[in-house]
Image (spheres, grey):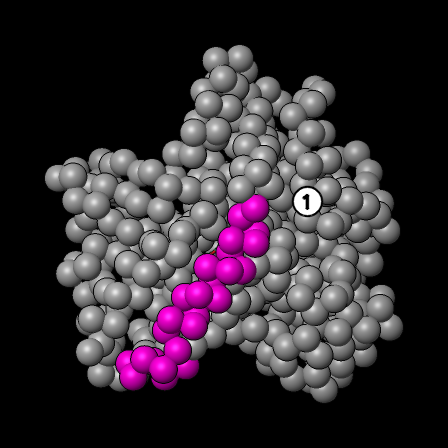
């Protein structure tokens, strides 16, 4: 059997990782400023993570959600304390798209409404509802297209208010920082207006923090910079440092009933252990603060470079929009300097490194970037 060819592959195969670095089969070392697409939070193969996972695997890898699982309770308590949403409750699933599906479902159950308002250029995943709320017709099949989702432009407060005033929407969903679009931030005014309009119209506010959350922005959640609270927050990516896990944080105004949401694999023993290890290391090593400081260091070091048309983002979620003559820079960073970065469209480099990146690692990148753009 061959693989279904849905990914464009780089001809490189990382086989080993440690911290902010990976190595290929030939032993070539790569600096990882991509984090396997914003997934590696505490660093590749962190010893605390490896030890906890090994131990759990020898005890119990999986049992179903029909029995008690104190790892889920421990994870919920630790996450609530660290992220500032101790009063929300936690539903565990396996991926970002699945988290958004469940967020839409919970919002629809709660309000009795069926429509979702999403933001222009949004990306929320590839499952049916999530892809319908993703502003990219190329990845929506006829089956996914629906009248239940409307898009409104980012940072256009008037348009947002007009849509929500209809009272038709179960929820408004917004990324903490738009990632796939190329790193675009909702303004603080937009978040605050969204919060106010949602309250006025009985709409739930969903913050999709799947890419921007878990400390990446320099706060636990990017929307917390705006000083507002979301009714539902979705997370995945950095939550398990590579072990598949996603979650929905639900406000206490949303009442649970048995059978309302469910999953076979979500919240299994290994996934919970991975997520508990991530939170432990994030706290011990103050990784949210590190994301803020090293992120700012990177932004400062990039400022003024002539190849850059615009620099965007916060913490370790940085978008470098390149001028037309520099479109090969991402490939050159990879093949000439052995540095992985992310991309968005054809002219944006996305930096999404592990949150434990050091200033020295940042210096290696800056030196490579500046040398290639001399
Ligand atoms: C903001 C956002 N939401 C949702 C998703 C979907 O997550 P997953 O690929 O885990 O389904 C992504 C993935 O890139 C994302 O960036």
Q: Position of residue 104 (x, y in %)?
A: 68, 55
What are the residue bounds of the magenta stretch?
286-310
Q: Would you say residue 63 is visible in this rendering?
A: yes
Q: Is residue 308 magenta?
A: yes
- Is 251 situated left or right of 145 in this image? right
Q: Nearer the viewer, residue 374 or 117?
A: 374
| Residue at the image point whose x is 77% and y is 70% from the top | 195
The residue lying at 67 percent from left, 66 percent from top is 225
Q: Residue 144: x, y in percent?
A: 53, 60
Q: Is residue 324 above or below residue 229?
A: below
Quadrant (top left, top right, bottom left, bottom right) of the N terminus: top left
Q: Is residue 179 left or right of residue 272?
A: left
Residue 370 at what x, y percent from top left? 25, 72
Q: Which residue is mark 1?
A: 82
Label 1 SS: helix
Residue 260, image x, y percentages: 75, 40
Res 196 → quadrant: bottom right
């Amino acid at each position: 059997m061959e693989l279904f060819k849905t990914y464009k592959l780089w001809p490189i195969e990382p086989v080993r990782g440690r911290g902010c670095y990976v190595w290929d089969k030939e032993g070539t070392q790569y600096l990882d400023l991509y984090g396997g697409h914003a997934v590696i939070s505490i660093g590749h193969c962190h010893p605390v993570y490896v030890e906890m996972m090994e131990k759990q695997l020898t005890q119990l890898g999986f049992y179903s959600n029909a029995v008690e699982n104190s790892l889920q309770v421990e994870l919920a308590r630790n996450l609530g304390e660290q992220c500032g949403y101790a009063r929300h409750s936690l539903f565990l699933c396996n991926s970002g798209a699945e988290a958004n599906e469940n967020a839409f479902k919970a919002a629809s159950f709660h309000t009795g409404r069926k429509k979702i308002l999403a933001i222009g250029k949004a990306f929320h995943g590839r499952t049916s509802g999530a892809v319908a709320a993703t502003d990219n017709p190329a990845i929506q099949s006829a089956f996914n297209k629906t009248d239940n989702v409307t898009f409104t432009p980012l940072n256009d407060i008037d348009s947002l208010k007009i849509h929500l005033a209809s009272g038709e929407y179960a929820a408004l969903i917004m990324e903490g920082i738009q990632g796939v679009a190329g790193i675009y931030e909702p303004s603080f005014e937009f978040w605050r207006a969204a919060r106010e309009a949602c309250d006025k119209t009985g709409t739930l506010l969903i913050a999709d923090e799947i890419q921007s959350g878990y400390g990446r922005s320099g706060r636990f959640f990017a929307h917390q910079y705006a000083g507002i609270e979301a009714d539902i927050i979705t997370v995945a990516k950095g939550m398990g440092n590579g072990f598949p896990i996603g979650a929905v944080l639900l406000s206490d105004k949303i009442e649970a009933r048995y059978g309302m949401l469910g999953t076979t694999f979500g919240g299994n023993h290994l996934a919970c252990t991975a997520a508990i290890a991530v939170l432990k290391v994030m706290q011990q090593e103050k990784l949210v603060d590190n994301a803020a400081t090293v992120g700012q260091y990177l932004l400062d070091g990039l400022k003024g470079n002539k190849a850059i048309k615009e620099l965007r983002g916060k913490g370790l979620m940085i978008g470098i929009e390149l001028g037309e003559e520099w479109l090969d820079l991402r490939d050159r960073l990879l093949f000439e300097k052995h540095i992985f970065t992310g991309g968005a469209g054809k002219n944006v480099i996305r930096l999404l490194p592990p949150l434990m990146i050091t200033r020295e690692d940042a210096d290696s990148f800056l030196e490579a970037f500046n040398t290639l753009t001399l």
